[in-house]
Amino acid sequence: MGATYFNSRATMHVEALSTELVPSQYSLQEMREFWTNHFQGTFDKGLFVNRYPLPKIQERYNFVTKCVTERFHTNFNLKLDIGYMPEGKQILAGSGVVDGFPTVEIIVPELMDIYRHQQQKNEPGWEERMCRMIVSSVIHEFDHLAFCNTNGTRAHPNSLDQLVENECKAWSYTCEYTIRSFIEDYGVSTGDTDEIFYDNWLKAHRNADSPLWRNFIREHYKKTR
Ligand SMILES: [Zn+2]
């Protein structure tokens, strides 16, 4: 599965900073080194080359990315952002269609903030858990691109109702096929946020149309609007 991977072209996004992203406290050099040292291998030596160590997760990644390329008739971009999302500092990843290309963005400064926080807490296995968290987050964004309404853009964001609609659907796929597989097939966690979503997915009897599920998603996302 060939992805256009912009890591080596991170300077491209400097220009976008002033208009779209909130500048981070980290230097470009720090962000590049951080990505290369801690997360690049998960993609370059794992998912991108069909060698992710958990086969069912690799399978899911292959399936959703195939759905995305079939839907848009083109390859996708995975882009590393060097500033925070204007909608909120806690946003780790996003997706959308940019100039006709389905695009997943990872917000590197937020990933660094989480990393530092986890490093301080220093719970057993935290680094591996973070690598799984980013995989789950990226697949969640592909769930959006593959199965949800992709009309929203940064300039013209979706209404809260449309956002809730999209997130109900995307998170139902992510919980059912990705988080569930990590937990049930491999007995590993992808982090606290995923666990909260999965817990609520089970409470809603794994039904994307359930009012419980819809309410949980709405509560989670209303602060971003
Ligand atoms: Zn989402």
Image: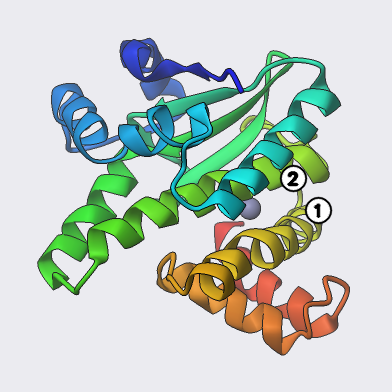
Real-space Cα distance between discs 2 and 1?
6 Å
Amino acid beneath label 1:
Gln
Residue 135 horizontal/vertical position (percent): 48, 48
Q: Nearer the viewer, residue 212 or 2?
A: 2
Residue position marked by numbered label 1 in the rendering: 162
Q: Which colour assignment does the render follow?
A: rainbow
Q: Is mark 1 within 8 Å of ligand 1?
A: no
Give the farthest residue toward the right.
209
Q: Nearer the viewer, residue 74 or 23?
A: 74
Q: Are marks 2 and 1 in contact (CB under 8 Å)?
A: yes
Q: Quadrant of residue 178?
A: bottom right
Q: Give the left or right position of residue 67, taking residue 41 as reference.
A: right
Q: Quadrant of residue 28?
A: top left
Numbered circles on residues, count: 2
Q: Secondary structure at mark 2?
A: loop
Q: Residue at x 57, y 75 (%)?
A: 184
Residue 211 horizontal/vertical position (percent): 83, 82
Give the farthest residue toward the bottom.
203
Q: Secondary structure at mark 1?
A: helix
Q: Is mark 2 within 8 Å of ligand 1?
A: no
Q: Give the left or right position of residue 131, taking residue 61 as reference.
A: left
Q: Nearer the viewer, residue 18 or 142?
A: 142
Q: Quadrant of the C terminus?
A: bottom right
Amino acid beneath label 2:
Asn
Q: Quadrant of residue 185?
A: bottom right
Q: Give the left or right position of residue 218, taking residue 79 as reference.
A: right
Residue 76 horizontal/vertical position (percent): 64, 22
Q: Which mark is residue 158?
A: 2
Residue 131 horizontal/vertical position (percent): 35, 51
Q: Residue at x 34, y 62 (%)?
A: 129
Position above or below: 206 against 122: below
